[in-house]
Amino acid sequence: MSNEKMTIHLKLWRQARGAAKGKFVKYTVENVLPEMSFLEMLDVLNEDLVKKGEEAVEFDNDCREGICGTCGMVISGVAHGVHAGTTTCEVRMRSFSDGETITVEPFRASAFPVIKDLVIDRTALDRIQHKGGYISVNVGSAPDGNALPVSKQAADSAMDAATCIGCGACVAACPNASASLFVSAKISQLASLPQGEPERRRRALRMVRQMDEEGFGSCSNHGECEAACPKEISIEFIARMRREFLIAAFRD
């Protein structure tokens, strides 16, 4: 591993709590090791700011292992950064050049109001999930793994959809701020399994309608959501969501 230290220039979004007007502020971070993660670099910045008596930059983070997605922010115009299939905490500073200027801002969407600096309110996704992204009927205890006739194709599809971590990068990347990839993954996951069948139609109706009520935009098949998704979820699930919704609406 290289011990050569870097100097990084940041153009970083600062915004006080509430509806205060935000702005980009320039910072310089020195003594950055290439092996540092992007969040560790922000930790170094905050340590310097605190030493100077200035207020630290607020940003979300939790596991720092690419699992939870709470670290999401837009780095140089790309949600989670320039590498495909990664969260912000997985981005290493060796991806940038010494002396480079990096623009850092929160996910932008009317349904994701800024709480402070790089921290946004993602509870709109939680409200969509609460409308049907679960199984509430009694389906009994866990059966033997071979007892239910679930095809490998259906099981694989359910697992692919289940990898969604609800980070909201799909919303930030979409020019319409659509949450269709998130919602379609949650709907498709349970629609692929026998346990999700009893509430299948109601789930599609309620989750899609809640998505619209939250103010997310419509999907126009740009594909930016798939490109920005840290779990590389396919937009094929959006087609399935539309089919599930249309069938449910017709029967309703």
Image (tube, rainbow, N blue to C red):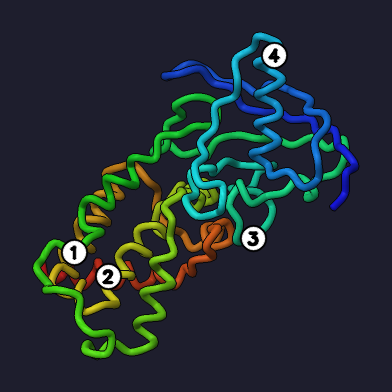
Residue under the image location 43 percent in, 55 percent down: 165
Residue 113 percent across, percent down from the top left: 42, 31
Q: Are marks 2 and 1 in contact (CB under 8 Å)?
A: yes
Identify the secondary structure beneath mark 1: loop
Residue type, numbered disc 4: Lys
Q: To which residue does mark 1 refer?
A: 135
Q: To which residue does mark 3 refer?
A: 84
Identify the secondary structure beneath mark 2: helix
Q: Is residue 96 left or right of residue 143?
A: right
Residue type, numbered disc 3: Ala
Q: Is residue 172 left or right of residue 211?
A: right
Q: Can residue 203 be seen from the camera position used here? A: yes
Mark 1 packing: few (<14 Cα in 10 Å), some, or many (20+)?
some
Residue type, numbered disc 2: Leu
Q: Is residue 216 left or right of residue 9?
A: left
Residue under the image location 23 percent in, 85 percent down: 144
Residue in the foreground of this view, choosing between 88 and 243: 88
Q: Is tag 3's residue or tag 4's residue first in the polypeptide sequence? A: 4
Residue type, numbered disc 1: Ile
Residue 127 percent across, percent down from the top left: 27, 45
Which is more foreground, mark 3 or mark 4?
A: 4
Quarter holding the C terminus?
A: bottom left
Q: Is tag 4's residue or tag 1's residue first in the polypeptide sequence? A: 4
Identify the secondary structure beneath mark 4: helix
Mark 4 packing: few (<14 Cα in 10 Å), some, or many (20+)?
few
Q: To which residue does mark 2 refer?
A: 190
Mark 3 packing: few (<14 Cα in 10 Å), some, or many (20+)?
some
Residue under the image location 19 percent in, 70 percent down: 200
Which is more foreground, mark 1 or mark 3?
A: 1
- Residue 51: numbered disc: 4
Q: Is tag 3's residue or tag 2's residue first in the polypeptide sequence? A: 3
